[in-house]
Amino acid sequence: VLYIAHIPKTCGTTAEAMIRSRVGPFRSSPKAGPIEMLRLPPGRLDRFDFISGHLEFGHHLGGLVSRPVRAVVFLREPRSLLLSIYKQMRKDPTDPLRSQAGVAHLEIEEFYNHPVASAYVENFQTRYLALAEGRLDPRAIAEIRAARSREAIEQ
């Protein structure tokens, strides 16, 4: 199983599209979040040769499928990543950073030094990987799979 752990703004969408086009829709996981993926019928993850997205399975994915997993993570040069996040925030009205007071109108230097924005972009890739790895441990995965509804998961 090829698994791309997609960190936002690091080429994951482009790489995912290229691989999906080669692997095909029946051997690729659906474009879904981690909870939806874990709620698939038992054994369904085993049918996929390619799994990707902003998922938090991390090294636990190997315990969910019966075949070896080869994980790929794209990292990006930090300045390039900062510019990409800045451009995304400026152009996308739904971007979560835009909701912070005045952030959408900052110049790039001000953006990087803003208390909210700088916490988001400073060492973003490492923080994303660390948070993602800790979110879905084997206990959390078992609870999600055992829950009777999405509402039960979110409680």
Image: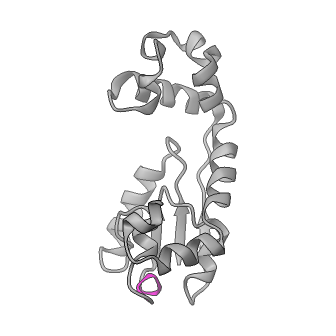
Residue 3: x and y in percent read: 54, 69
Q: Image quadrant of residue 123?
A: top right
Q: Residue at x 58, y 67 (%)?
A: 57
State whether the magenta stretch is mostly helix, strand or loop.
Answer: helix
91, 56: nearer the viewer: 56
- In this rendering, the answer to whether 59 lies above or below 119 is below
Residue 146: x and y in percent read: 49, 81
Residue 105: x and y in percent read: 43, 10
Residue 130: x and y in percent read: 69, 52
18, 50: nearer the viewer: 50
23, 144: nearer the viewer: 144
Q: Is residue 110 magenta?
A: no
Q: Is residue 91 visible?
A: yes
Q: Is residue 34 visible?
A: no
Q: Is residue 44 magenta?
A: yes
Q: Horizontal placement of 141 versus 40: left or right? A: right
* Residue extent of the magenta highlight: 43-47
- In this rendering, the answer to whether 28 lies above or below 131 is below
- In this rendering, the answer to whether 118 lies above or below 55 is above
How many discs appear?
A: 0
Q: Residue at x 44, y 88 (%)?
A: 42
Way the structure is coloured:
one colour
Q: Residue at x 55, y 84 (%)?
A: 65
Q: Residue at x 37, y 63 (%)?
A: 32
Q: Horizontal placement of 81 versus 37: left or right? A: right
